[in-house]
Image (spheres, rainbow, N blue to C red):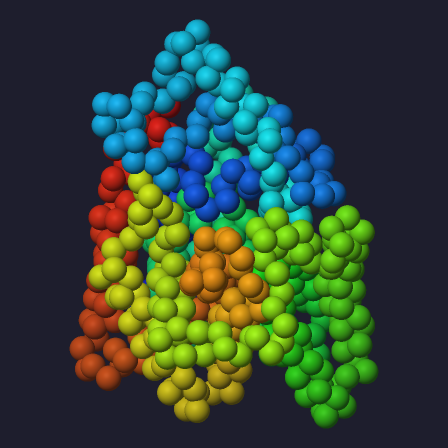
Amino acid sequence: MNADDTKSPAGFSGAQERKIVLLLCCLAAVHVFIFSAAFPFFNNVDEIAQFDLAVKYSQGHVPRRLELLSTDSTPYLALYSSGMYFGTPEMFPDGKFPTPPWKQPVEKIRQTLLANEAAWRTVTNYESSQPPLYYALEGCWWRAGQWLGFENGWRLYWLRFLNIFIVAALVWLGCRAARLIFPENPFLRLAIPAVIAFFPQTAFYSIENDALLPLCFGAAFICLLQFLRAEIPDARLAVATGLALAAAFLTKMTSLPLLAVSAIFIALKIFQMAGEKKLRAALPALAALVFCAALPMACWMTWCKLHFGDFTGSAAKAGYFGWTHKPFAEWWPHPIFTLRGFSVFMPSLIATFWQSEFLWHGRPLSLPAVDWVYIVLSVGGVGMALLKFPKMPRPQRRALWLAFWSVAASVAFVGFLSIIFDFGDDHNPSRARPYFTAGRLILGALIPFLLLILYGLDCALGRLKNSRARPLALGVLILFMLLSEIAVDWPVFSNEYNWFHL
């Protein structure tokens, strides 16, 4: 009998399930394409700096200090920066934004463009010390766009559209993770990739390294699950696990808490194998894992130490913004340790994890009612999942503990960063609001997070005797995500500076 013809617990074959997941990958691609095309360049979430690094890496140039913006980047900045994120129509004489520069006669705007280019060339790229993997990938994609004949604004959007493939791959990884943990649960096997396909996080519509991290750690998470389940891990699995962890590190430094949790679970596995007298047989695989993970990390840390003065490169960026480390004794009066402060930090972090940090005409592109739906869903889903942990089989419980601590460590990490810095005259974070509440900083934990909340939702719906409750709830959730995102972002679609008006 063909394996594709065997029935899954859902009542449909494995081949049919794969077709559904493939459809979800395609829907995710369409979703990311439409919203990426709708937003003009350049947004308020570091897209200018991220774009500049992609261009530099495309030329084989890795920054050795906080450099000025490249002369190859500034023509795009001068011509395609919209001002829509910070500007308002009232700032202009006729009460509306001017016609995009690329639609105006070159003779009319030449001097303005040259002046703008000169101004951009004086701007420092404060992201120069970021890890290289995302920018190397984007640099190759930028060159590919050139080879395919894309120019000007089309080439800019081509760079953004790499996220289409990243999110489609993330959908597949979400399905893979759900199948490993919940092989008997058809609802979760499809709910997790479906939610990823319509996840409304605007980091996926922008040029920024936050978009790649959930894919890298998602792969590492799946490898870790297999590593923890193996009686004696083989070398191939160990190499894949080590390389996936290294990829997460080389994508963004906010992967550090995820790597720390991964290291703890690997150490627990080592102790388990030692107690079972299996450690000797596993030593080659463990050596391969450590080598594949540690060598790329050590190389980048050495680069940062040599060129930026510290092992993570973060000191240069902190110095650029005027952040200074507070003495240890000054950590504890921080407002995050109060109920009022925590009630600002945590809801804001959850809301921006689901949605957006984008501004539109100087105001946050969000709706408070939508934010609170996501906050309640997140807290309720994780809480319900934790209540069910004691009754779970050991392999599932260990997998979800790995998911939980990945999320918890990521939240604790941005909380820790909020505590240790004096933010000086910076405006976000600031001394008045000293919190890192950018949800994209913990986006690496996306798959673990969705495993938790959707398992919690599944547990809550399990109390109902209606067999249609789960698919109905999933449909309502996806419809809410999509419709609320359209409602929030609707003003964006009609602006003249986006891809639809090139």
The residue shown at (38%, 59%) is 352
Image spot of residue 218 (x, y percent): 53, 62
Q: Is residue 204 visible?
A: yes
- Quick check: 257 above or below 162? below
Image spot of residue 145 (x, y percent): 55, 28
Marker count (numbered): 0
The residue at the far top in this view is: 107
- Quadrant in the picture for residue 323: bottom right
- Quick check: 160 above or below 454? above
- Quadrant in the picture for residue 5: bottom left
In front: 75, or 493?
75
- Quadrant in the picture for residue 74: top right
Image spot of residue 153 (x, y percent): 45, 25
- Quick check: 263 above or below 360? below
The residue at the far left in this view is: 466
The residue shown at (26%, 23%) is 93
Image spot of residue 224 (x, y percent): 61, 71
Indicate the quadrant containing the C terminus: top left, top right, bottom left or bottom right: top left
Lateral position of residue 462 relative to residue 329, left or right: left
Lateral position of residue 270 relative to residue 430, left or right: right
In front: 245, or 223?
245
Q: Is residue 188 visible?
A: no
Lateral position of residue 304 relative to residue 479, left or right: right
- Quick check: 87 above or below 225? above
The residue shown at (35%, 28%) is 497
The residue shown at (29%, 26%) is 92
